[in-house]
Amino acid sequence: MITISEPLIGEPEEKLVLDVLRSGRLVKGPMVEQFEDEIRRVTGTRHAIAVNSGTSALIAGLMSNDIGPGDEVITSPFTFVATLNAVLHAGATARFVDVGNDFIIDPVQVATAIGPRTRAVMPVHLYGCPAAMEPLATAVAGKDIVLVEDAAQALGAEVGGRPAGSFGTGCFSFYATKNVTTGEGGAVTTGDDEVAETVRMLRDQGQRACYGYGLPGFNLRMNEMQAALGVAQMARLPDIVEARRRNAGLLTDGLSGIEGLLLPVEPPGRWHVYHQYTVRVTPGARRTRDELRWLLGANEIGCGVYYPRPVFDYPCFRDDPRIARSPTPMAARLAAEVLSLPVHPKLTAADLDRVIDTVRLALK
């Protein structure tokens, strides 16, 4: 079976986790601090605060910027549900604008959608490709609006040589399938001292110091074993990104020229880290997306649909007054066409050839 995702776990991870277990210090220890140092190094930010999930990072990232009831957050309709859940749990209203052919929120539509209640713009760096941050920064310049980057899938990605997560408040995930994993985990990055202090309080029951409470908080802490995994994984990050980019290039070379199959692209000035290699099976293809998905599965090749609907298009959200809807036809179209193929570092040349041959045979 060729899996859609498989983490690189080996002796360095095992050693550091065992070191933590043998130390007896499982929380609030030096391993979390070391992991945060590594995230700061990669993102070039003054602060990195580790938390227990990417969703927690998004919620804390919004709340630390004073986003709450009465505020609107402009974001993408084509994303994982954590993006929307974070806005709602912060108490704000989500306003959706459509995405472009790069799967990412359209800066022109963002600028048009900004209104008197807009307090944050949350681009999603989807599949490892960062958003076009320069026009988004221009759109909010001079306004009381913050950029909160949903960089869950994009550690190591860059825009114009600047790391994702460094344009505003960055929110990362280290879930089991991410390019760097801690099993479960996340981090918030920022250059703002006040935002950083608030995130640290939010993650630890609102404490500035032991029993010194500054606000109502949560338990969002990352533990030492998770951080140990992360420290070892961060040492692998350059090799992981190189392998994913190499595999993506081989997939693109092998799948080019198939009628109705649109391949992912790396927009100029944006460094893609290929958390997913996502194609579009358009109406011009010989088979539908779902038929191709079934055939890949029948040939023991993992694949996935990320994501099958615009994020707001579920019964639990349809009547929620905190969701401001507008037409998002590109997001709806993408949801019917996208299919992610294996691109992870453990793939062999034979694996990639098998993926390519199976897709070509299905769509020729």
Image: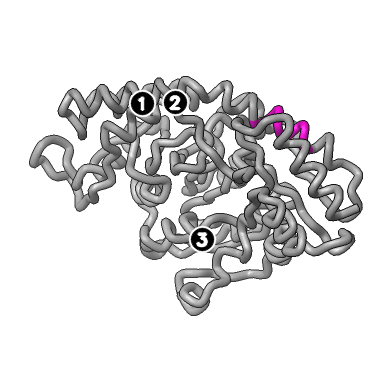
Please indicate whether residue 319 sits to the left or right of residue 356 in the image. left
**Residue beneath the point at 80% across and 37% down:** 252
Q: Quadrant of residue 343?
A: top right
Q: Where is residue 325 in the image (x, y as percent from the top left)?
A: 58, 70
User: For mark 2, what is the residue?
Assistant: 10
Asked whether 99 falls inside the magenta stretch, the response is: no
* Looking at the image, residue 348 lies above or below residue 152: above
What amino acid type should be assigned to the residue bearing mark 1?
Glu
Color encoding of the figure:
one colour
- Residue farthest toward the left in the current orientation of the protein: 211
User: Looking at the magenta stretch, what is its main secondary structure?
Assistant: helix
Say which label, 3 or 1, has the lower sequence index: 1
Asked whether the residues under the numbered discs 1 and 2 touch, taking CB atoms below 8 Å apart as contact, a structural biologist would say yes
In the image shown, does 93 or 173 lie closer to the viewer? 173
Say which label, 2 or 3, has the lower sequence index: 2
**Residue beneath the point at 58% across and 22% down:** 239
What amino acid type should be assigned to the residue bearing mark 2?
Gly
The answer for how far apart the CA atoms under marks 3 and 1 are is 51 Å
Task: State the mark number for residue 14.
Answer: 1
Q: Where is residue 271 in the image (x, y as percent from the top left)?
A: 66, 30
Please tell me how crowded label 1 is: few (under 14), some (14-19), or many (20+) other residues with Cα within 10 Å.
Answer: few
Task: State the mark number for residue 23.
Answer: none
User: For mark 3, what is the residue?
Assistant: 116
In the image shown, does 306 or 327 lie closer to the viewer? 306
In the image shown, does 278 or 117 lie closer to the viewer? 278
What amino acid type should be assigned to the residue bearing mark 3?
Pro
Q: In which quarter of the image is residue 37?
A: top left
**Residue beneath the point at 31% across and 41% down:** 199
